[in-house]
Amino acid sequence: MTPATLVPVELLRKYDRPGPRYTSYPTVPVWSDRIGPDDYATALRAASQRTTEPLALYCHVPFCRRRCYYCGCNTVVTKDRSRAAGYVEILGREIDTVAAMLGDRRQVSLLHFGGGTPTYLTIEEFTKLLDYLRSHFAFQPNAELSIEVDPRVTTFEQIDFLAESGFNRISMGVQDFTPDVQQASGRVQPYEMVARLIEHCRTRRFKGINIDLIYGLPKQTVETFTETLDKALQLRPDRVAVYSFAYLPNAMPHQMRIHQEDLPATEVKYRIFATAVEKFTGAGYRQIGMDHFALPEDELSVAQSDGRLNRNFMGYTVQQAPEMIGFGMSAIGYVNNAFFQSYSKLDSYENAIADKGMAIYRGIQLSADDLIRQYVITNLMCNFRLPFADLEAKFNVRFPDYFGPVETRMEGFIADELLTVHADRLEITPRGRTFVRNIAMTFDAYLAAEPGKAPTFSRTI
Ligand code: SF4
């Protein structure tokens, strides 16, 4: 198969529709605000019994110095540095409260800092935060400690500090290297700035160095993005994520600074994405999920080959820590088969923590059916396959009995050569990898029950 046929534009056109990214199942729009701190406390106490199972921890640092026009994150834009110091104190209170409920459950195999901009914190603030975490949790020797950094504000001194503190994975936002695109997107960071930072991270032995790119940004063309892809390949990151930009100025008024007439037409966006898949796979990267790529020797690729890749709100991971504790404004956790999320506004979050030590305002307790579908969707999204025997061993259900005749359900995908059905498994083809979200959607009971919910999501391409 030639690269040009790996992602045919007519299939992008056919399958481009609103759909979840499946960083969780059930997806956030069906969560309930009837879930609160009491449910969280009950779940934490139940989780405390599993003392030998490692946890994953997520810490959200919401601050940014200025807002990128395309931003879709939960962020607090401020130049008032004192807010960060107060936030670290509040996080300490939340960590104390949650850790007390977890009792002897202390082992941690994964810690991720996301934002916002985690390196908005000074080294002193970061030290304090890590001290809070270390006073309650024990990081396993092979634990993955990862962080998102913004090349514009992250100093070599901060990188050295992170390396010395045990951080071993790093991810940085690049988006696009074209000066005009950067200008129109409100985020200017020259190629050399990114190259120097990556080089420095390598000297400090960071592994799994990731860069994020975004397609669909203002002033992008196939030609300019091809240059960005070539530059990205020169840097040879271990991992690359290529996200689609969702222009939603009504929901996110700061996006109004992007002129609609500067946005690439939908057909151009398809060709840009197809070029990205072609470039990275052509350069030897493996496609991990729809829009992630990793070098063959990277542990994500190895885990995918072995069928043990995992996915959570932070992205793809090799760590097997199904329970995750979220700390900070808007943070999401998964404990005792339930999702929990804290308030997404800083004041509400800080007030709730000051009051109760927890700030949960919504979530969902998974039913038996949710757990089965979560397993199916996660396997498809991560490993591009679903062995029926694994499903049966884990849930005691036979795939055809539970989901009905697979050929009927998957007819269109089979005809488009996106999926093959075998006696013992479903297998997504190399061409089908780009459409894995569409395939996963057919197992989403909430979309089937309320198809009108789908427009809540950004488009799949
Ligand atoms: S740095 Fe990231 S979180 Fe902050 S404004 Fe830009 S895109 Fe949003």
Image (cartoon, helix red, strand yellow):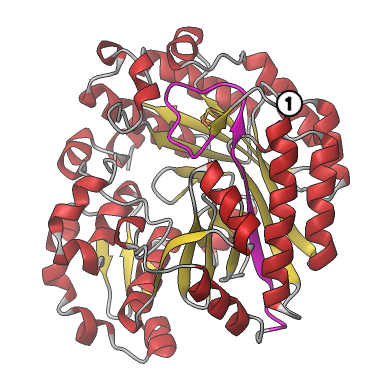
Residue 394 sits above or below residue 55 on the image: below
Write down the region rendered in magenta: 51-75
Residue 56, position in %: x, y? 64, 64
179 relative position to 94: left or right: left
- Amino acid tagged 1: Leu
Task: Report the residue at 62% width, 81% height from top.
Answer: 45
State the image quarter where residue 180 is shown: top left
What is the magenta segment's predominant secondary structure? Answer: loop
Residue 62 is covered by the magenta coloring: yes
Q: Is residue 79 above or below residue 371?
A: above
- Quarter of the image that includes the N terminus: top left
Q: Is residue 44 left or right of residue 153?
A: left
Residue 382 forms part of the magenta stretch: no
The residue lying furthest to the bottom in this view is 396
Q: Nearer the viewer, residue 419 or 267?
A: 267
Q: Position of residue 249 (x, y in %)?
A: 30, 26
Residue 453 at x, y = what percent?
Answer: 19, 54
Q: Nearer the viewer, residue 445 or 384?
A: 445
Look at the image and tell me whether residue 203 can be seen: no
Q: Is residue 381 visible?
A: yes
Looking at the picture, tell me which residue is in the foreground, 265 or 119: 119
Tell me if 259 is positioned left or right of 86 in this view: left
Q: Where in the figure is residue 83, as x and y percent of width and height? A: 68, 34
Which residue lies under the disc numbered 1? 197
Q: Report the residue at 18% width, 74% height from top.
A: 406
